[in-house]
Amino acid sequence: MIDDARRWYCQGLSLQIEALDRALRALSDNDGDAPASLRRIARGLRDSGQCFGFSEISEAAGELLEAENGQLGTVAAGLVDTLRTVTAVVDTAVVKVLYIGADQGVARAATAALADRHREVLVALTATQAEQLLDRHEVGLVLLDLVLPDRDGRDLLVELRRRPDTAGLPIFVLAKPAGDVGRAECFALGADAFLTRPINGDALAPAVVSALQRFGEIRSEPRRDPITHFLNRAAFSETYDYHASLSARNKTSMALAVVGLERGGEGGRSDASARTFAQALSKSLREVDVIARWGGDDYVVLFPGTGARGATLALNKALRALGDGSEPSAVFSAGVVAVAGGAPLPEVITEADRLLYVARTGGDERVISSEDEPARQARMIVLAEDDQVTANVIQHRLAREGFQVRHFLSSTDLLANVTELSTASLFVLDVKLPGMDGFQLLQRLRERPEFTEVPVLMLTSLGSEQDIVRAFQLGANDYMTKPFSSAELRARIHRLVESARNSVR
C-alpha cells in the first residue's frame, strides 16, 4: 500500500484553490457570506496542513483566520499562492486511478477528466485485466463499470472488497440509469458512489479528488491523537523541524511549552475531560499556535513568532479563561522555553519539562518560563560518590536540570569542606565510600544543626531490607539502588528538593 500520505493531501489542494478563488471573487462583489467562507476553508487548511506536515500551509491559513475583514482579500490571495507553490514544487508521487470497463469512449472521457501531474488513469477492459493491473500497481481509486465482457461488475465489486490491497479503496460504480434496487445493491456490496453513464467530466473530477483526499485523511489518522485530535509526537516533530528552520533562517522568535493538565480537577482525567480540555485550550490560544498531545495529561504547544515572555502571557491568559467559568473548569501548569534557532526538539522538550516540574511544585506559580530562571538561585546538591563514571553521569544530568553540583570522592573530603556546604539543598550519598562509609557520613551530617532538615538520598548497590531500614533510621529521606534510571533519579531529586523548600515557606 502507498505509505506517503502527503501525496494524497496534494490531490485535494486543487479543490481548496478553486473554492478560495470563488470566495475571493464573491468578496470583491461584496458578498456578505464571503468572509465566513474564506475563514471556514482556512480553518480546514490550518488543521490539515499541520496533520500532513505542510506547516507553510497551516501558517498561511492561520494568518487568514486572524486577519481583519479589510485585509482578508490580500491574505487570502497569499494563501492561494502558498497552495499553488506547494502543488508545484512538492515532489509527490503520482496516484493511479483504475478504470475498469469495456466502453473505450468512457475510458477516454475519464482519462481526459482525471489525468494530470498528480494522477494517472489506468484502463482495464476486462475484470481479468483489472486483477492483473492491481497485482502490478498501487491504486488509489477504482472506477468500475458494471458492464464487463467476462464478469458481472457487481461480482467484481465483491472481489475487490475481499482483496487486502483494495478493501479500503474508494470505488465509484458507473452504470446506466438504474432503479433504487440496483443502486441499493451496489452500495450494499461496498460502492462509495454510484454514477450514471455517460459521465460528466466536470462533475467526476472534483468527486474523485475529494474521495482521494478523504482517503488520505483516513490513512493519516495515526498522525493525530484519537481523543483530542491534536497532532501526535511524530506529526508535531515534523512541524517543529519546519518552524525551527524557518525561525533560524528569518531570525524570528519562537517558544515551546510543555503543558501538564493537573489531576486534581473535578471528575479525573477521562477521555471526555481530555477532549473538553483540548477544545478549551485550543480556543484560548492563537490560530497559528501548534498543539500536540505528548502523552497522558501532557501537551506541547509551539508558539511561532513569539518569545518565551509572550508565550507565558498567552498561557496565563488561557489559564484564567479556563478557570473563570466561561470554560469548563481545568487547571494546568506549564514550562515555557525560548527556542534558539535550530535547537533539537528533544533538548527543548527536556528543558520545558524541567520547568513544568518547577511550576508544579512552586505553589501558586503555575507557568514558569526560561526567562524567569536567571532570578532563581542555582540550588546546590552535594554528591559523595567514589566512582567517577557514575559521578559524571549524575553531575551532567543535574547540571542540565539547573543544579550546582559539589562532588566529593570520599567522606573525608566532604567533611573537610563541610563549612562550605551550609546552603546545600540535598545530599546524594553512596554507601560504599573509602574509609568512612555512607551510613557513617549520614550520621555525622545529621549531628550538625545546619543539616538536620536537609534531604538525603542514599545511592548504593546494597538493596537488602536491613540496609534500607538502617538508612531511614539514620535520617535518610530516600534510597535508590544501582543501576539506576536517570529519569527516576531526576524525579526523586526534584521531589525531595521542592518538598524541603515548600516545608520552610
Image (spheres, rainbow, N blue to C red):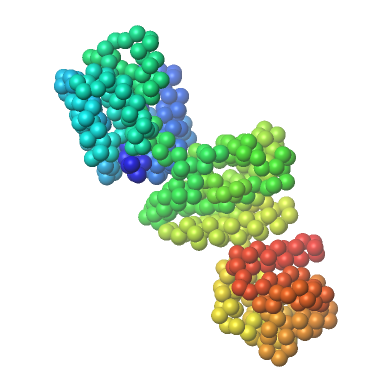
Q: Quadrant of the C terminus?
A: bottom right
Reply above or below: 59 against 414.
above
Reply above or below: 467 against 12.
below
Q: Of 55 and 130, which appears nearest the observer?
A: 130
Q: Residue 503 at what x, y percent from top left?
A: 80, 63
Q: Is residue 12 left or right of residue 418?
A: left
Task: Write down the quadrant of residue 150 in the picture.
Answer: top left
Q: Of 3 and 398, which appears nearest the observer?
A: 3
Q: Quadrant of the N terminus?
A: top left
Residue 51 is at least partly visible in this image: yes
Task: Write down the quadrant of residue 463 in the picture.
Answer: bottom right
Q: How many marks?
A: 0
Q: Residue 417 at what x, y percent from top left?
A: 71, 86
Reply above or below: 234 against 87.
below
Q: Is residue 437 left or right of residue 116?
A: right
Q: Residue at the location (68% across, 67% down)?
A: 493
Reply above or below: 254 against 267.
below
Q: Residue 203 at what x, y percent from top left?
A: 29, 19
Q: Residue at the location (35% across, 44% down)?
A: 3
Q: Residue 113 at what x, y percent from top left?
A: 22, 24
Q: Is residue 212 left or right of residue 295?
A: left
Q: Residue at the location (18% across, 19% down)?
A: 103
Q: Residue at the location (49% across, 46% down)?
A: 232
